[in-house]
Image (tube, rainbow, N blue to C red):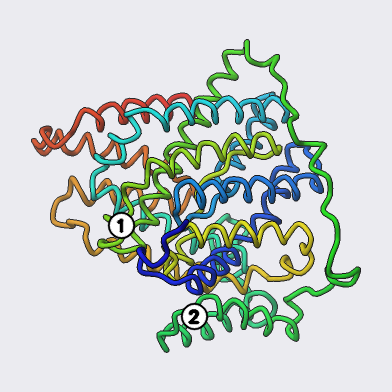
């Protein structure tokens, strides 16, 4: 089914890559319910709903697209979902309806010829920038979650506590993972996560209390959030503005994620796999619908998939392993959630490093290429928004090509997408 040998991989490698990706993104089962609960949704039900959405969307990516990409509720879109409820006056049921409608539009777009044109005509400079920006964003997430990055009273970043607790464990993890990488071990990232988790037990960072009631436990019912739609809002003009914004975030977060992950594969593999992007978009869009039905915000392909790809994962068997492990989380949540953020931080930073390597192909001598790329990198890294970073960089790319007298390099698709990006930023402001 997965044609592992044809993709220059082995089943053992694919499964190990899936385990690495899973460990790099399992935090979503804790973070997503916590953030969505700010919108008034029940946290217990959200845990199960998040797992179901992740399993369904990742299985689609495995079985339909045969790609090593894991899909789960996107962190950036989760934040916007909460804003819809807390600041725009909609109920969370109406916000879920917005996710459902935007997902349906996303499916239609994924089936249209425009999708292929966008994928073919994204400028290489923008592709390199997106990969580097996502790499920094992933490293940023890891450092924040471990406490290595802290915020002082003035709102500035500062170094967190590294002499004890999570910060100390993260530092130890850097040395352990760095040593394993230097030894050129193929499973270095996975071994680093496991070793750091074990080291965290005597340090009091790795929590084992979740196992006190037994290893196995039935998951909470997702009933309170599943299929909780309110279609009375369809007559609202403001609702359709929300739908359009969600659609832009879904499409271009997905596009940015695909570009970045193909970059991690390297030039040879990226070209071999690029023809699968159409199926990847379809799987991503149907995943949004599945997430809406489960009761969570839109899903997207996770940049953390780069950790498994860096290990050599190349087929849907990798994402199938991710889906199976998330399914186990429904019964073994206490066991899997004992992995502290500090143990995952070194792997995320290493993935960020691998993604930053794409910049060696950027033409720094051409300001019309390098400046838009730099804008994407810093906006994605500091705002944690793929869609906003790509929007600003895309519009800047068009402007600078015109100023430099290189208007002929701008295709019709680049212009159309630029107009759509401009409309998106105006509506979101």
C-alpha separation, residue under disc 1 versus residue under disc 2? 23 Å
* Residue at the image point whose x is 91% and y is 68% from the top: 213
Evaluate whether residue 393 shows in this view: yes
Residues packed near mark 2 inside 10 Å, few (<14), some (14 to 19) or many (20 plus): many
Q: Position of residue 49 (x, y in %)?
A: 72, 45
> Relative to the observer, which residue lies in front, 108 or 40?
108
Question: Would you place residue 342 above or below residue 319 in this image?
Answer: below
Question: Would you place residue 333 above or below residue 191 in this image?
Answer: above
Q: Position of residue 348 (x, y in %)?
A: 51, 67
Whichever of callouts 1 and 2 sits on the residue coming sooner in the sequence is: 2
Q: Element under label 1? A: helix
Question: Would you place residue 75 above or below residue 268 in this image?
Answer: above
**Which residue is under mark 1?**
270
Q: Quadrant of residue 391?
A: top left
User: Given the current orientation, which residue lies at the most extreme front position?
Assistant: 1
**Which residue is under mark 2?**
188
User: Given the current orientation, which residue lies at the most extreme top position?
Assistant: 235
- Closer to us: mark 1 or mark 2? 1
* Residue at the image point whose x is 69% and y is 17% from the top: 231
User: Given the current orientation, which residue lies at the most extreme right position?
Assistant: 213
Marker disc for residue 212 = none
Left or right placement of residue 68 versus residue 367 in this view: right
Q: Element under label 2? A: helix
* Residue at the image point whose x is 24% and y is 39% from the top: 121
> Relative to the observer, which residue lies in front, 228 or 3?
3
């Amino acid at each position: 089914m997965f044609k592992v040998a044809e993709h220059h991989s082995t089943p053992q490698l694919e499964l190990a890559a899936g385990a690495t990706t899973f460990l790099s993104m399992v935090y979503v089962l804790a973070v997503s319910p916590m953030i969505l609960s700010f919108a008034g949704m029940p946290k217990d039900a959200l845990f199960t709903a998040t797992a179901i959405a992740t399993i369904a969307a990742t299985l689609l990516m495995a079985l339909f697209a045969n790609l090593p990409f894991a899909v789960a509720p996107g962190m950036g879109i989760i934040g916007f979902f909460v804003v819809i409820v807390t600041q725009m006056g909609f109920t969370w049921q109406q916000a879920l309806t917005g996710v459902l409608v935007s997902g349906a539009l996303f499916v239609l777009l994924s089936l249209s010829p425009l999708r292929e044109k966008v994928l073919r005509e994204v400028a290489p400079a923008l592709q390199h920038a997106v990969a580097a920006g996502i790499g920094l964003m992933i490293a940023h997430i890891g450092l924040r979650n471990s406490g290595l990055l802290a915020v002082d009273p003035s709102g500035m970043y500062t170094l967190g506590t590294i002499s004890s607790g999570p910060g100390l464990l993260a530092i130890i993890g850097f040395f352990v993972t760095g040593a394993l990488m230097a030894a050129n071990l193929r499973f270095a990232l996975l071994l680093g996560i496991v070793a750091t988790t074990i080291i965290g037990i005597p340090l009091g960072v790795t929590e084992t209390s979740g196992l006190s009631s037994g290893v196995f436990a039935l998951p909470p019912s997702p009933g309170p959030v599943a299929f909780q739609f309110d279609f009375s809002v369809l007559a609202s003009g403001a609702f359709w503005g929300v739908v359009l914004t969600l659609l832009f975030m879904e499409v271009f977060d997905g596009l940015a994620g695909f570009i970045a992950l193909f970059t991690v594969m390297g030039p040879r593999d990226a070209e071999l796999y690029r023809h699968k992007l159409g199926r990847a978009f379809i799987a991503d869009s149907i995943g949004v619908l599945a997430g809406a039905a489960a009761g969570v915000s839109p899903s997207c392909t996770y940049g953390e998939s780069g950790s498994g790809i860096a290990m050599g994962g190349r087929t849907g068997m990798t994402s199938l392993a991710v889906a199976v492990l998330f399914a186990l989380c429904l019964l073994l949540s206490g066991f899997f959630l004992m992995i502290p953020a500090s143990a995952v931080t070194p792997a995320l930073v290493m993935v960020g490093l691998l993604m930053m390597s794409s910049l060696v192909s950027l033409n720094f001598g051409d300001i019309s290429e390098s400046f838009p790329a730099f804008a994407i990198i810093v906006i994605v890294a500091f705002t944690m928004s793929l869609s906003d970073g790509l929007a600003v960089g895309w519009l800047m790319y068009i402007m600078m090509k015109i100023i430099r007298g290189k208007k002929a390099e701008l295709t019709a698709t680049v212009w159309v997408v630029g107009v759509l990006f401009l409309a998106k930023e105006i509506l979101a402001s």
